[in-house]
């Protein structure tokens, strides 16, 4: 089973005949058993890419191209199977649980709704949480535990594909690395397709060996390959500059401005 994006473009009208080129001609292959990470500057199109898989695009967006989970279904059918064919990990776990009910009841309800086969206890086990968490209210769990619980909810319907858009944005650096490792494990140990978009390149350090990485710039995937290769020997000038901007590499500011994606010319290239 593979997640395949072929020539996927998204245009978002913003009035007066103008539109945001949120995603342009994207081809991407994410195989099961191997996590696929997506990095790129703010506003480059990472979330839009995730939304073409989860079906959470803005209502006004124009979508073209093909998104397929081989052996299962193709968008827009895929979008109707959110939770079952594609699980969605929220950016902040706080948004996926109600504060007034214990975790166990909420997870049980998710399992019932998605007709999942695992019990809440088994789901917690899969994400490394102890069964005691079932009897707790969300506010009684730490941020890292709550993000694990949110990942448990995302796999309650046993989806073969899991998408996480900025899953570490509410976490400190150590919890971020934990959350990324857990998501990578959903691919490596549970044989799922896992797609994770993040601007947090440092959180990826422990998992780059068995992962793929795509780099998005100005609505296009400019580079893709084994994560350790892309991060150690980047081929695209934007990837090189993005990596040079990391604190550990000297915080060199990006030398070229990020263009506006409104009516972006088709021939726009990095640095042009
Ligand atoms: N609902 C919307 N209406 C108009 N423009 C939008 C909408 N959603 C996204 N965009 C635009 O689409 C482009 C891509 O946005 P997207 O959120 O996919 O980028 P991103 O890489 O996820 O950024 P970030 O790192 O900030 O999350 C941006 O120019 C953004 O302003
Ligand atoms: Ni985003």
Image (cartoon, rainbow, N blue to C red):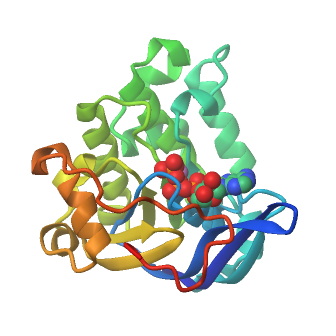
**Residue at image location 50% in from the left, 68% down from the top:** 218
Q: Is residue 251 visible?
A: yes
Q: Is residue 83 visible?
A: no
From this view, report whether residue 44 is shown above or below residue 29.
above
Report whether 7 appears left or right of 268. Answer: right
Q: For the view shown, which residue lies furthest in the front direction? A: 272
Report whether 36 appears left or right of 74. Answer: left
The number of numbered badges drawn on the structure is: 0
Camera-nearest residue between 100 and 266: 266
Report whether 132 appears left or right of 46. Answer: left
Camera-nearest residue between 45 and 5: 45
From this view, report whether residue 261 is shown above or below residue 156.
below
Camera-nearest residue between 86 and 39: 39
Q: Which part of the image, by quadrant, shows the C terminus?
A: bottom left
**Residue at image location 18% in from the left, 53% down from the top:** 205
**Residue at image location 39% in from the left, 78% down from the top:** 222
**Residue at image location 30% in from the left, 64% down from the top:** 188
Residue 107 placement (x, y as % from top left): 60, 35
Looking at the rendering, the quadrant in which ligand 1 lies is bottom right
From this view, report whether residue 125 is shown above or below residue 201.
above
In the figure, residue 243 lies in which quadrant?
bottom left
Residue 64 placement (x, y as % from top left): 72, 82
Q: For the view shown, which residue lies furthest in the right direction? A: 16
Residue 185 placement (x, y as % from top left): 31, 56
Residue 182 placement (x, y as % from top left): 32, 48
């Amino acid at each position: 089973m593979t997640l395949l994006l072929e020539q996927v473009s998204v245009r978002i009208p913003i009035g007066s005949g103008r539109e945001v080129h949120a995603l342009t001609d994207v081809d991407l292959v994410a195989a099961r058993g191997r996590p696929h990470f997506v990095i790129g500057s703010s506003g480059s199109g990472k979330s839009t890419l995730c939304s073409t898989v989860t079906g959470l695009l803005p209502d006004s967006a124009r979508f073209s191209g093909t998104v397929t989970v081989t052996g299962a279904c193709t968008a827009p059918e895929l979008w109707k199977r959110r939770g079952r064919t594609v699980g969605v990990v929220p950016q902040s776990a706080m948004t996926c649980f109600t504060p007034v009910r214990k975790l166990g009841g909420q997870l049980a309800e998710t399992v019932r709704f998605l007709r999942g086969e695992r019990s809440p206890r088994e789901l917690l086990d899969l994400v490394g949480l102890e069964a005691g968490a079932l009897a707790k209210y969300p506010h009684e769990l730490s941020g890292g535990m709550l993000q694990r619980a949110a990942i448990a909810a995302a796999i309650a319907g046993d989806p073969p594909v899991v998408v996480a858009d900025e899953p570490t944005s509410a976490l400190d650096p150590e919890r971020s690395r934990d959350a990324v490792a857990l998501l990578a494990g959903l691919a490596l140990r549970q044989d799922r397709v896992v797609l994770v978009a993040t601007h947090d390149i440092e959180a990826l350090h422990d998992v780059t060996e068995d992962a793929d990485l795509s780099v998005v710039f100005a609505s296009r995937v400019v580079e893709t390959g084994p994560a350790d290769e892309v991060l150690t020997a980047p081929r695209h000038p934007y990837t090189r500059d993005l990596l040079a901007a990391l604190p550990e590499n000297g915080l060199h500011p990006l030398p070229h401005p990020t263009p506006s994606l409104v009516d972006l010319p088709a021939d726009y290239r990095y640095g042009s």
